[in-house]
């Protein structure tokens, strides 16, 4: 709140949306670690180690290549066009229907994704604190989202650049502190950490069975396209990069962020192997949901009070770091892309932006409560499953726009982008029967993009044929 007060004074729409394009690149790079890690990674990645080992790192290696493609392919386009919303590119390339379709898919994707991430923190705080006070879950969710709205309502990106860095600092402190103290609980010296993790039966990283969801090349290339789609084509993540002074600084930010993030994710995997080593050594009953393992051990006294404190601090910081920028990005996209706020008078712009900011906070609360009622598996799986269906059309649109000079039929774009996820769902549901046991994993995102790309190509060919007949 103190940071919000300092950065939000005399803030304008330009400050709210792009921090006046004066943000230090190294501060953004550090803060993006917290935004990308989120509470989902904090809980789901360590818990999932038992079922999928270190295979998630195959995806993370793909992230690195994906981030570099963002730096050298997408960022030059966005900076050259001086964009506030990255979906304005679709308007210039395709037309009004392509523009609105892309922005709508982002809004859907980010509302669901941000709600998943905030849910993690709310669920933990509910179990640790608010259940004992008989506070309903909906009240806890409302308090958390209201706090995020409160410190982002004035400064927007000007505030978030600094609060994300602060939250990342707490997240990393919690991660490192937890690993150190859990290592002590296992009666290991810190020098034994590497050998203990390497010897873990859950530390297998590379999988080479083609039919498996964990097959290396499926995971790696899925990671490449997940990074491009969920970072490079995501207003939330790219809005921060667009606040840098120059494209060179933005590219340095992405390069260093990609390296540090890979190190941090490996530490979360190592943490997972230590948690399961402790469970087996202490004969503790593993919870039915893997997402519950770390919260249970950390908050029920297994590792002492300090680890409990670090865990709650870390999960809260991680969730806030990803949620605050999401709320700002949702507000930005809805105002700029859906309501065309730039065409209105300045006072109307300010009033509209503040009202939409409140509306988006309310929407997040509603989705969090709905998710509470239906969630029954590891949240990391939910996040990537949703990404496969909602970011796929976005990836297909941008790929078609950047890799070809063909004029797609703009009026067809909404139908193509709606049909593609439906086809993917049918293929995913029947893949074992239709493709000799093959199972889709994260590569469903790539398939979705290819179907969208093909649909746009067909629409362009149809439009040219119709034009030829008319002539």
Image (spheres, rainbow, N blue to C red):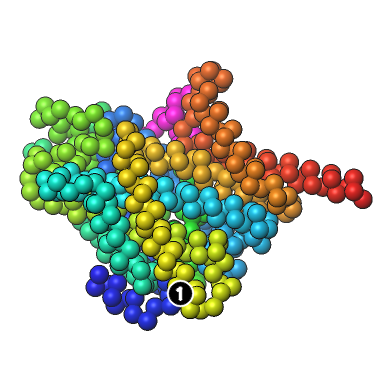
The part of the chain drawn in magenta is 205-220
* Crowding near the residue tagged with mark 1, few <14, some 14–19, many ≥20 C-alpha atoms within 10 Å: some
Q: Position of residue 34 (x, y in %)?
A: 32, 56
Residue extending farthest to the bottom is 10
Asked which quadrant contains residue 449, the reply is top right
Residue 294 sits above or below residue 108 on the image: above
On screen, residue 344 versus residue 148, left or right, reads: right
**Quarter location, residue 426:** top right
SS at badge 1: helix
Magenta stretch secondary structure, dominant: loop
Indicate the position of residue 300 as horizontal and vertical percent values: 10, 40
Residue 35 appearing in the image: no
Q: Residue at x 82, y 47 (%)?
A: 464
Q: How many marks?
A: 1
Which residue position is annotated with label 1?
A: 350
Residue 197 shown in magenta: no
Above or below: residue 245 compared with residue 287 = below
Q: Residue at x 14, y 46 (%)?
A: 134
Q: Position of residue 32 (x, y in %)?
A: 37, 59
Lateral position of residue 85 relative to residue 411, left or right: left
Say whether residue 280 is left or right of residue 103: left
The reply to whether residue 154 is in sight is yes
Quick one: quadrant of the N terminus? Answer: bottom left
Residue 187 occupies quadrant: top left
Residue at the location (35% across, 69% down)? 153
- Is residue 138 toward the left or the right of residue 72 in the image? left
Residue reaching furthest to the right: 471
Whether 216 is among the magenta residues is yes
Q: Position of residue 166 (x, y in %)?
A: 26, 64
At x 48%, y 58%, the residue is: 235
């Amino acid at each position: 709140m103190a940071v919000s007060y300092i950065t939000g004074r005399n803030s304008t729409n330009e400050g709210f949306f792009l921090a006046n394009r004066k943000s230090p690149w190294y501060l953004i790079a550090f803060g993006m670690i917290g935004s990308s890690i989120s509470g989902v990674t904090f809980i789901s990645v360590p818990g999932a180690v038992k079922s999928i080992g270190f295979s998630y790192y195959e995806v993370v290696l793909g992230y690195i290549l994906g981030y570099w493609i963002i730096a050298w392919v997408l960022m030059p386009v966005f900076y050259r066009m001086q964009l506030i919303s990255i979906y304005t590119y679709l308007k210039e390339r395709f037309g009004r229907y392509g523009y609105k379709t892309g922005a709508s898919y982002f809004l859907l994707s980010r509302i669901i994704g941000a709600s998943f991430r905030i849910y993690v923190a709310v669920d933990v705080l509910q179990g640790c604190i608010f259940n004992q006070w008989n506070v309903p879950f909906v009240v806890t969710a409302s308090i958390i989202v209201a706090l995020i709205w409160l410190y982002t309502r004035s400064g927007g990106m000007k505030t978030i650049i600094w609060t994300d860095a602060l939250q990342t600092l707490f997240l990393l402190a919690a991660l490192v502190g937890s690993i150190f103290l859990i290592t002590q609980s296992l009666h290991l010296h810190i020098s034994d950490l590497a050998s203990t993790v390497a010897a873990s039966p859950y530390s297998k990283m590379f999988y080479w069975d083609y039919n498996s969801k964990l097959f290396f090349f499926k995971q790696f290339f899925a990671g490449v396209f997940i990074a491009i789609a969920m970072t490079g084509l995501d207003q939330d993540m790219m809005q921060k990069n667009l606040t840098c002074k120059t494209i060179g600084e933005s590219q340095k930010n992405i390069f260093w962020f990609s390296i540090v993030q890979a190190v941090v994710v490996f530490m979360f995997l190592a943490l997972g192997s230590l948690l399961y080593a402790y469970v087996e050594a202490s004969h503790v009953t593993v919870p039915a949901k893997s997402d519950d393992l770390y919260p249970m051990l950390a908050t029920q006294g297994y590792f002492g009070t300090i680890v409990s404190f670090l865990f709650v601090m870390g999960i809260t910081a991680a969730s806030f770091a990803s949620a605050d920028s999401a709320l700002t990005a949702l507000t930005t996209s809805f105002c700029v892309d859906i309501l065309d706020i730039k065409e209105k008078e300045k006072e109307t712009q300010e009033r509209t932006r503040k009202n939409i900011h409140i509306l988006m906070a309310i929407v997040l609360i509603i989705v969090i409560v709905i998710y509470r009622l239906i969630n029954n598996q590891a949240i990391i799986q939910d996040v990537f499953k949703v990404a496969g269906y909602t970011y796929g059309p976005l990836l297909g649109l941008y790929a078609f726009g950047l890799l070809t000079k063909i004029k797609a039929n703009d009026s067809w774009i909404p139908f193509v982008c709606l049909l593609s996820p439906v086809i993917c769902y049918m293929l995913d549901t029947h893949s074992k029967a239709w493709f000799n046991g093959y199972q889709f994993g994260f590569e469903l995102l790539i398939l979705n993009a290819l179907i969208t790309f093909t649909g746009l190509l067909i629409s362009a060919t149809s439009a040219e044929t119709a034009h030829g007949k008319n002539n």
